[in-house]
Image (cartoon, rainbow, N blue to C red):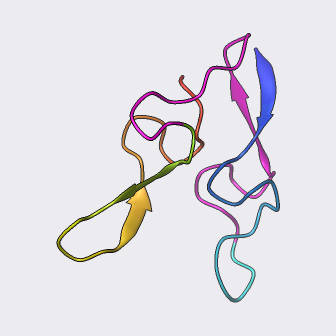
């Protein structure tokens, strides 16, 4: 396993205002991924999917927001 920067929080470990821990990485800023790290094919490594109707972003179901294939 390898460590890779979390795509959802950008490696900060913080998710949104108030400093709450990132749900994708648990507040670490990094996630364990298979070696070699491969970007998620569903979200193309962004960790986010956009709802075209509501225009809101949510964590990718494929990588759970980490941005990396598991």
Location of residue 45 with respect to 46 vertically, above or below: above
Image quarter of residue 14: bottom right
The residue lying at 40 percent from left, 62 percent from top is 58
Location of residue 23 with respect to 55 vertically, above or below: above
The residue lying at 36 percent from left, 43 percent from top is 61
Main SS of the magenta segment? loop
Could you say where residue 51 lies in the image, as x and y percent from the top left? 26, 64
In this view, the residue in front, 57 or 34, is: 57
- Left or right, residue 44 beside residue 29: left
The residue lying at 78 percent from left, 61 percent from top is 13
The residue lying at 35 percent from left, 73 percent from top is 56
In this view, the residue in front, 36 or 52, is: 52
Q: The magenta stretch spans which residues?
A: 21-44
Could you say where residue 37 lies in the image, as x and y percent from the top left? 70, 19
The quarter of the picture where the N terminus appears is: top right
Image quarter of residue 55: bottom left
Is residue 18 located in the magenta-colored stretch of the structure? no
Location of residue 5 with respect to 55 vertically, above or below: above
- Left or right, residue 51 beside residue 64: left
- Left or right, residue 48 beside residue 7: left
Could you say where residue 31 lies in the image, as x and y percent from the top left? 72, 37
């Amino acid at each position: 396993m390898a460590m890779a920067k979390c795509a959802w929080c950008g490696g900060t470990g913080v998710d949104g205002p108030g400093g709450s821990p990132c749900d994708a990485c648990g507040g670490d800023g990094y996630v364990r991924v298979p070696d070699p790290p491969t970007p998620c094919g569903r979200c193309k490594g962004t960790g986010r999917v956009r709802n075209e109707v509501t225009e809101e972003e949510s964590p990718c179901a494929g990588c759970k927001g980490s941005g990396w294939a598991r």
